[in-house]
Image: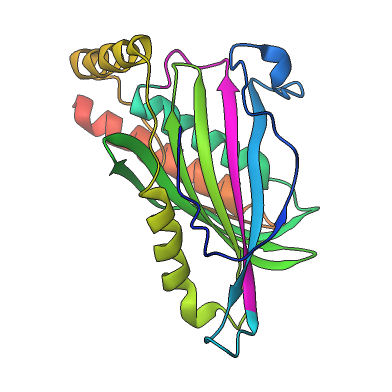
Amino acid sequence: MTMDLHPLATRWREEGHFPSQLNIFDDDAFGFEASDIGYRPCYESTWDIKGAPLIGKQLSDLDFRLILAKCNDKDNLFIPSSLLDIVKSESLKLFNDDRYYLDVIALKQVEDISINGLSFTFHTNEVEYKTRGDSIEYIWTISITEKHFLQFIFSLTANEKIRPHISAVKDYCTSIMQTVQIDFPEWAEREKAAAASASKDTHQIAAMEPLVWKREADIDSYLNFRREASETTKQTEEQEQK
């Protein structure tokens, strides 16, 4: 895999020392922590966002992370619905903790995006932390085997100074993603083709709730949302059976 991280960007901190090679089939390389999904950070960096040229006052900062994950509880992540299902369930687990998160709007703008012949799932999260203010995340996810996926995560500190420039920051993140190249080996290409064929032949489309959910600390808004969505789905199925 290659990508261009734009050397003109001001990179003021790079965290972690990551190996140049990794055996993705070695479970010991992942931190599962009693979960069906194990994670392995591959790269982390933070850039500051400057204002007008010459003046150059710092407006905000942008974190970039590349994460490799292994999933043991899905049959085949090359089936798009399986990958999206994982992204949704992991978002719920991550943000369902009011010790850290005051307000969360997750899985916004969910869409499938093609980049250099690769199929990514894209979504955004808006997060208000209890300790460090607002953040906006732009996340591109792609399966690289039937059990592994990569996540490209850009996290913007969304203070008042950067608010007028958020669309420009998103465009910048998108331009970086346009440089991503992944060379799949032949066996992975065969797996992808087989999964796509199976998905079309058997109509393996998961029945999922709407793609935007919101949780707020100290209330059960998301639980209510799920109950309402479940009831709506049940009523729809009953009407279709009549």
Q: x, y (%) of residue 115? A: 31, 43
At x 52% / y 58%, what residue is drawn? Answer: 7
Query: 81 or 236: which is nearer to us?
Result: 81
Magenta: main secondary structure equals strand
Horizontal side of 124 relative to 92 (left or right) equals: left
Q: Kindly tell me whether residue 229 is visible in this rendering.
A: yes
**Given the current orientation, which residue lies at the most extreme bottom position?**
55
- In this view, the residue in front, 60 or 105, is 60
Image x and y of residue 15, in percent:
74, 48
Is residue 212 visible in the rendered image? The answer is no
Q: Quadrant of residue 103?
A: bottom right
Span shown in magenta: 59-77
In-image side of 151 versus 135 (left or right): left
Q: Is residue 41 left or right of residue 179?
A: right
Residue shown at the point (59%, 54%) measured from the top left: 221
Image color mode: rainbow
Q: In which quarter of the image is the C terminus?
A: top left
Q: Residue at x 43, y 43 (%)?
A: 229
Residue 26 percent coordinates (x, y): 65, 11
Position in image of residue 114 (x %, y %): 28, 41
Residue 133 part of the magenta segment: no
